Amino acid sequence: MELSIIVLSYNTRNLTLACLESIASQYKKELEEKKLEIIVVDNNSTDDSVASIKYCVSHLRQGFGGQASIRLIESKENVGFGRGCNVGAKESSGKYLLFLNSDTQVLDEGFLSMVGFMDKSKNVAILGGKLENNDGSTQRSCGKFYNLFNLLLILLGFERLGFLRSSPSKIQKVDWVSGACMMVRHDVFEKLTGFDEKLFMYVEDMEICFRAKKLGFLTYFYPDLKLMHKSLGSSNRTFAIINIYKGILHFYAKHKSYPEYLTAKILLIAKAEILILVGFLTFNPELRNRYRKAIS
């Protein structure tokens, strides 16, 4: 088995079905030859995702004469992104693991090119793929590690201007890549003991790339594929802000000195307090509540 594609699903029924069907349509030969497997981990969805995915998996298998390795793992609880991906990885057998968001649609055979690049580049452990919006514009899907200066730039809004995140037009070494499309050598993933399960969602992609670098492994960005990504397919703005705050603080507590952690915490609180004030002045209770929860 060359490649295991692991898709985490949580209340994204239609998106997950579209993702699975797009993979099957582009990689029919590899699925038939059992060079590729698809593992869906459902994080205890509360909609009818499980029943629909089961039907889709059964239908896809029949289409491949019952030979293709496409399966569903049902979690008894919503364990978050990192832990859910770890569950799928433990059940996989591919030389490479590809963690793919359920809100993506595969538009070409670019994953095979990524595998080819990894085969030739033994020093590269993690490879991120280019992501596109529905309108064909490019998403900034790799970035720089969150040192204090970079964190300050993020909190000032410079990340949106492309100062810290980008989507290079050529293959190149980067600090970290988006978990929405992240290929990792299976043996390296095991050495890293997978994603940090204390991070429920967000920051886990940057964190695992940081740990990989500490062990001497390289992370690269790969632009030569067509992959459409609908951001926030299974979350919302408030949920994202709260978990990004938690993730950044956990990252600093785990990997940085106490003075750096304390500085990061002060910066996050200052940003939140400013936006809470803005919420009061603009009569925006949603903004106030969002950042109150983030620092609570």
Image: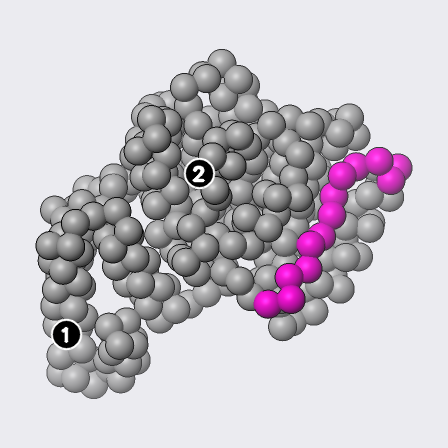
Residue plotted at (39% across, 42% down): 208
Q: In which image quadrant can residue 277 be found?
A: bottom left
Q: In which image quadrant can residue 126 be found?
A: top left
Q: Which residue is mark 1?
A: 273
How far apart are labels 1 and 2 at the CA level?
36 Å
Category of crowding for the residue at label 1, using alpha-carbon neighbours closer than 10 angstroms: few (below 14), some (14–19), many (at least 20): some
Task: Give coordinates of residue 57: x percent, y percent.
Answer: 77, 50
Residue plotted at (55% across, 48% down): 86
Q: Quadrant location of the C terminus?
A: bottom left
Residue plotted at (64% across, 61% down): 75
Task: Give coordinates of residue 281: x percent, y percent.
Answer: 13, 83
Residue plotted at (79% across, 37% down): 68
Q: Quadrant location of the N terminus?
A: top right
> Residue 168 or 117: which is nearer the viewer?
117
Tell me if 201 is positioned left or right of 245 in this view: right
Decide: is 9 above or below 213.
below
Magenta span covers which residues? 65-77
User: Residue 53 has which mark?
Assistant: none
Q: Is residue 170 magenta?
A: no
Foreground disc of the pair 1, 2? 2
> Residue 153 or 278: which is nearer the viewer?
153
Q: What secondary structure is found at the residue carrying circle 2?
A: loop
Q: Which residue is mark 2?
A: 192
Pick whichever of labels 1 and 2 is earlier in the sequence: 2
Residue 179 visible in this rendered orientation of the protein: yes
User: Residue type at mark 1?
Assistant: Glu
Q: In which image quadrant can residue 286 be found?
A: bottom left
Decide: is 164 above or below 34.
below
User: Residue type at mark 2?
Assistant: Leu
> Residue 28 or 193: which is nearer the viewer?
193
Task: Give coordinates of residue 72: x percent, y percent.
Answer: 71, 52
Task: Give coordinates of residue 171: x percent, y percent.
Answer: 37, 23
